[in-house]
Image: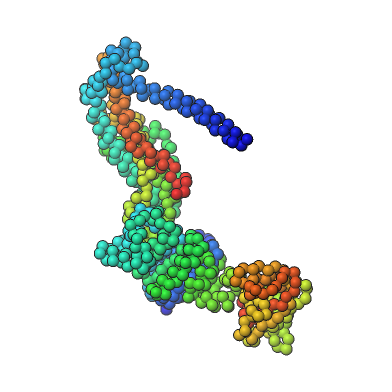
Amino acid sequence: MSSNATATVVRTGASARFVIYTLLALFSLFYLLPLYVMVVNSLKPLSEIQSGGMMSLPEVWTLAPWKSAWSTAQIGVEATGLQPFFWNSIVMVVPAVAISTVLGALNGYVLTKWRFRGDTIIFGLLLFGCFIPFQMVLIPMARMLGLVGLAGTVPGLVFVHLVYGIGFSTLYFRNYYQQFPTELVRAAMIDGAGFFTIFRRIMLPSSGPIAVVCIIWQFTNIWNDFLFGASFSDFDSQPMTVALNNLVQSSTGVKEYNVHFAGAIMAALPTLFVYIVAGRYFVRGLMAGSVKG
Amino acid sequence: MGFLEIKNATKSYGPVKVLHETDISIEEGEFLVLVGPSGCGKSTLLNMIAGLEEITSGDISIKGRSMAGVRPAERNIAMVFQSYALYPNMNVGQNIVFGLEMHGVPKPEREKAMNEVADLLQIQPLLKRKPGQLSGGQRQRVAMGRALVRNPDVFLFDEPLSNLDAKLRVDMRTEIKKLHQKLKTTIVYVTHDQIEALTLSTRIAVMFGGHVQQLGTPKEVYDNPANMFVAGFMGSPSMNLFAARVALENGKAVAMAVLADGSEAALPFAQGSSFEKHDGREIILGLRPEAITDRDGADRNSQSVHFIDAHVEITEPAGSDTFVVTQMGGKEVTGRFRADVDVHAGRKFPFAINMEKAVAFDPKTEARIS
């Protein structure tokens, strides 16, 4: 009797799982459809798209749209391709992510292990900063950048993203370090380690998972940002997102959809790359502290 | 002037005073145990000695040097934490020498010190392992090694054995005691376990409610508790405390305790105790279980053993002893009988009471009378 009952349970379990996985597979196919469209259309000549074959595989495979998008496409007034703007984005993202992560870690360390009067208020204000809509700060920020002479430059953009990023990175590290045993810090103090030595030798080596979460989050946000890029950059300091927009929006000549698709994929590749390299730590980091051990 | 001197030290968090004026002074090489229930201020006091908590008022000095404003690293102390607090990213060897490295000791000397300590604690094979790969007892050793290697003036132990299982705890207790006898360093040790306190210490400070209730040698604290809290806290099973009335008969004081059947038992106090002021008054009489026993188990050296017939409520055989429960002064009173005494619940049995060991407390102030 009982073995029959278990058998039924297993069978219903299997069929239920079959339904679930089929549905999930369909959903993911649907979700991946735009990527498919982008990839196939970036690899075919423009004539094939214009003749209405959006969904079909290319008849003639070509890398020409990619080459064009990278180095020869008309962006604004000059035919430079996306290449210089890609480097603009890299030069903007790397320091912004690095500095905001390090400062966030430092803030989290202070807010949990070197508590001071009013620290919760400071933390509250930092959190509040995370949730101020971007649009609200555009004009004051433009004025600020103008005053300090960073308007229209890549360092200016780095600064803007840094200011916005610190709130989030502090939140991540504070919550992570809250779980970190304070006795370790005290032991290090008695051992004679100072503020920064404890940070560098004790805290940072144990911060891998949360650092990955923070880096992925900041990298994605800053790389994908369009509003700040469009508002605070000059033509030669534009980030990738803004340049892509200019490529697609340029009103002269024929719309080269295959080049546009190639450019859009290029703009998305770095974030994809970061997810693939560090993604498995991402889930682990988000779960960190939720389960003991 | 003691080696470690705590003078009028207090600690407050805002309006809450967690440690009241505390004076403790110990000599070099002493083993001071701060014992008390949780929240009594013992860990706070330890952290104040370590410099991890600021002193609100008063002073603490080590080797005659005031510790006011001296950072933990400069006090020449070492501490073993309850959670061991081993740095998870460093291996055992690096953990042990981290303090030396921070104090700028050159590498060859660090290695030498590390090997000495590893030999002493027999953790030589573990040096390359990470703390996560060690058992509880091994972590405990490493934590002690990290403290030992510094060769500090004072060792501070914060409930170091409370995370270990019962058997290991007893082993490590013995080991700590051996280590102390060998190295003769000054130790301040916090625990809530009164047995640890009695076995390890040369001096005990019993704490409760932010006050040091009594400071003394283990024997003083056990035999002559200053108040009812100390009497009840130290010893296992704890001291029997029950109400009795003082009567003076021919100038000799007698404690009258009501038994289960309503009759009064007369228990004359030992010579030398003075109760003139308390004639006819209620007191709380304190008798340890080993002072209430069977006829043949009674202390032969005592001049003041008295016998009463009392009703046995329960017997609890515990292997080496049998604990016998009766009623006195309206309270359950436990006596420690020899294991093979033929005693049965529900009957009367002669109890031998050693009044030399009896202590008396004021029922209102809970302080010791005599």
Image quadrant in which you'd find residue A217: top left
- Vertical side of A255 occupied by B159: above or below: below
- Vertical side of B362 occupied by A34: above or below: above
Q: Position of residue A106 (x, y in %)?
A: 36, 49
Task: State the residue at coordinates (36%, 44%).
Answer: A211
Instruction: Pick the quarter of the image with the C terminus of chain B.
Output: bottom right
Q: Residue furthest top?
A: A51
Would residue A226 appear left or right of B298 to someone viewing this image? left
Image quadrant in which you'd find residue A145: top left
Seen from the viewer's position, the closer of residues A159 and B224 is: B224
Q: How many marks?
A: 0
Seen from the viewer's position, the closer of residues B293 and B211 is: B293
Q: Position of residue B201 (x, y in %)?
A: 48, 73
Seen from the viewer's position, the closer of residues B191 and A162 is: B191
Seen from the viewer's position, the closer of residues A233 and B110 is: B110
Q: Position of residue B143 (x, y in %)?
A: 40, 62
Q: Residue furthest right?
A: B262
Q: Residue furthest bottom?
A: B250
Task: State the residue at coordinates (70%, 88%).
Answer: B251
- Vertical side of A72 occupied by A233: above or below: below
Task: State the residue at coordinates (28%, 66%).
Answer: B112
Q: Position of residue B200 (x, y in %)?
A: 48, 72
Q: Is residue A232 visible?
A: no
Q: Is residue B227 visible?
A: yes
Instruction: Pick the quarter of the image with the N terminus of chain B.
Output: bottom left
Task: State the residue at coordinates (51%, 26%).
Answer: A19
Would residue B291 appear left or right of A229 to someone viewing this image? right
- Vertical side of A290 occupied by A242: above or below: above
